Image (spheres, coloured by chain):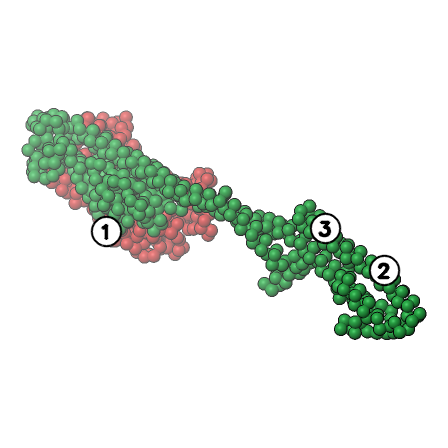
Amino acid sequence: MIRRRDFIAGLGGAAAWPHAARAQQGDRVRRIGVLTGFDENDPLSNSLVSTFTQALADLGWTDGGTVQMEVRLSGVDINRLRALAHELVGLQPDIILACTRQARVALQRETQTIPIVFASVIDAVTGPIVAGLDRPGGNITGFANQEASLGGKWLELLSEIAPGLKRAAIMYNSTAVAHVGYFQAAARSLKIAPIYALVHSDVEIEAAIIALGREPGSGLVVMPDAFTFAHRAPIISAAARNNVPAVSWLTDFARNGGLLSYGVDVVSTFRGAATYVDRILRGAKPYELPIHYPTKFEMAVNLKTAKALGLAVPPSLLLRADEVIE
Amino acid sequence: MTGRSKTFKDLVQASGWRQINGPLFRKYVALLLAVIFVVLLISGSLNGLLEIGFAYQQHKASLVRIQREQAEAAAAKIGQFIKEIESQIGWTTQLPWSTGNINQRRFDGSRVLRQVPAITEFAQLDATGKEQLRQSKLATDVQNSQIDFSHEAKFTEAVAKKVYYGPVYFRRNSEPYMTLALAGIRRDAGVSVAEVNLKLIWDAISLIKVGEHGQAYVVDDQGRLIAHPDISLVLGNTDMTGLSQVKAARAAGGGTLNETGQIGKDLRGRDVLTAYAPIAPLGWLVFAELPVDEAYAPLYQALARSGALLLAGLALAFLAALFLARRMVVPIQTIRAGAARIGSGDLAQRISVRTGDELEALAEQLNRMAEQLQDSYAGLERKVEERTHQLALATSRNPGFLPRRATICASLCMRSASSLRSCTAISHLPTAAGLSIASTRR
């Protein structure tokens, strides 16, 4: 963990030169906590955290200089996450970045005073967040990276790319996902039988996808959470082996062999979160900063995977794709 | 304080200041100072001050004009943003509705959503106002919903005026949105309706630089903020109707703001110089604001410069007045002192004044007078000596002659300068009889 932090510090330091003077205004070194449910060996999650660090450095907050970063990566173990949340709050940092929904929930249990900025939290309206999106109360604000209604959109896209879809499973790890309702509604209107695949391990992922593969006309919708993020590789490979067309929220999913992805540019939410951290460190109150919802959505289609599944990608979908992997 | 005044006093005494610091000197200083100051004021500083007074009005007018141009440029940019959306939607309303071309329409809709990031939802209504297709970036698409919009403004207005701009609404009470509806040239082409996320105007607005710390922002016809460099204020659903400049602009209805409307306070309570421009078809207003401190900084600098020059001029004038007054008063003082010494009997005293003017002539006159006095005194002394001698001779010859001495003495006194001193001088004459002069004066 320490090696990783040093790496991020170095990365931030290189680009922070021109703004170093600006951040000197607060003379004492600020402490920024970062809590994620990501795995520490996941290159994507590491690049997200370093995006955040880099964006902060560009705003004048260099790790090791004007700020001290305390990065804690728990992996998907919820107990470890809670323990790390407790530890982080114990350090009394000036502000904490919550990178996943579970991280935000765990932090909210620990503190009502330390400002929390979230990025990539699945859906802000689900957990016990504050009244009104325009004015979040208390100590929490941030950049949400999901729209609950995408739960239905994914199923629709899946039915477009895989005509003849009769049944579709939503794969999720956390029950508190607002997308499920939209998924159900879409399934009803598209006349597709919904299947609920609550998974907690690679074995359960494998079992659920094998079951889908046995019956033709089946598809998979991967719900956004830290678990499916961390386990995206086994999901992609199991879907490929069992000939199951699958759609995910994460662009990286299609880039690495998944069929289709549609969702928010996650990187931009981490950059956005850095701007909020900057403003709070400069004296803004979390409740003055409204929660940001995404405006840009990106679609990626993997033609190789489509070909392997024997699917012809319709032009209407290709037209909408921001990224086509061939 | 007392220490300082004491040293000043010492200084004054050491420099011999006291000797010339009389009423005449003060009069001269005041007079000269007044003259120099008036000249200075008229020729330089007053002129400068008046100039600044005029410049203030001109500067303010030109600032307001520049800001208005900036606001107009921003308004044009936002107008362009809306026009582009219209042109992107435009070609979805060219073909008449028929049951066969729904897939083509769907394709067009997908393309619109792809091309225009700001459009979140896109619906196509047929010629009777029924919704045939609704596509969204967030929600599932709906085909053939047949929802009747034929009595809603987005259909009726669009059909009547070809284009309809709906009021701004806030999705989730946070993100500003507007409904934009467009009708085709042919009536049977139906109406295309786009839900436009106005958050994306931010790109246009944040690029506009008003001075160093100024900014531009947009309010809708209700006075709510819909675009601002700080997007958080927009998402926070900020009501701008409390700001005096927004009130004034809404009352002016597109015209120029009056004097008081040009100065207002921004959301942070700073005084700002404001100009605005309307975005005509939308009823929105773009404001360009510059903090007053920054706007008037050049004027304040000019004012400070003129003030400093005036002060420096005054100080110089004071020194010059002192110098000139001293030049005039010193010879007068010398003459006065010289005259006083001559008056006290020091007839050998000569006054030395070399100013080459009337004062020098006056000093010469006095010198001549003293000289003549000295001469006549010397002559008198000689005569007295002679007479005394004769008297002594006469007395020695005829002792009864003595009483006549008083008469001689008195007549001498009359003929000489009749000054007391002459008489006193005579009274000191050696008298054999020892008579007092007091008796001769009787």
Q: Nearer the viewer, mark 1 or mark 3?
A: 3
What is the number of the mark on residue A285? none
Which residue was labeled with disc 3? B364
Looking at the rendered structure, the kind of residue marked 3 is Glu
Cβ–Cβ under 8 Å for marks 2 and 1? no
**Within 10 Å of the Cα at label 2, are there few (<14), some (14-19), or many (20+) other Cα atoms?**
few
Q: Nearer the viewer, mark 2 or mark 1?
A: 2
Q: Report whether A13 appears left or right of B229.
A: right
Q: Secondary structure at mark 3?
A: helix
> Which chain does the residue under circle 2 lie in?
B
Task: Respond whether the residues carrying marks 1 and 3 are from the same subunit.
Answer: no
Residue B367: x, y in percent? 74, 53
Residue A274: x, y in percent? 36, 44
Q: Report whether B338 appears left or right of B402.
A: left
Say if residue B192 shows up in the picture. no
Residue B377: x, y in percent? 80, 59
Which residue was labeled with disc 1? A132
Q: Secondary structure at mark 2?
A: helix
Q: Report whether A323 appears left or right of B304.
A: left
For the residue pair B277 and B159, the one nearer the viewer reads as B277
Cβ–Cβ under 8 Å for marks 1 and 3? no
Rendered residue at 14%/43% (across/down): A184
> Which chain does the residue under circle 1 lie in?
A
Looking at the rendered structure, the kind of residue marked 1 is Gly
Looking at the rendered structure, the kind of residue marked 2 is Arg
Question: Could you tell me how far apart the alpha carbons at marks 1 and 3 are, in whole angstroms?
Answer: 103 Å
Which residue was labeled with disc 2? B382
Question: Could you tell me how far apart the alpha carbons at marks 3 and 2 are, in whole angstroms?
Answer: 27 Å
Q: Secondary structure at mark 1?
A: loop
Colour applied to chain A: red
For the residue pair B97 and A270, the one nearer the viewer reads as B97
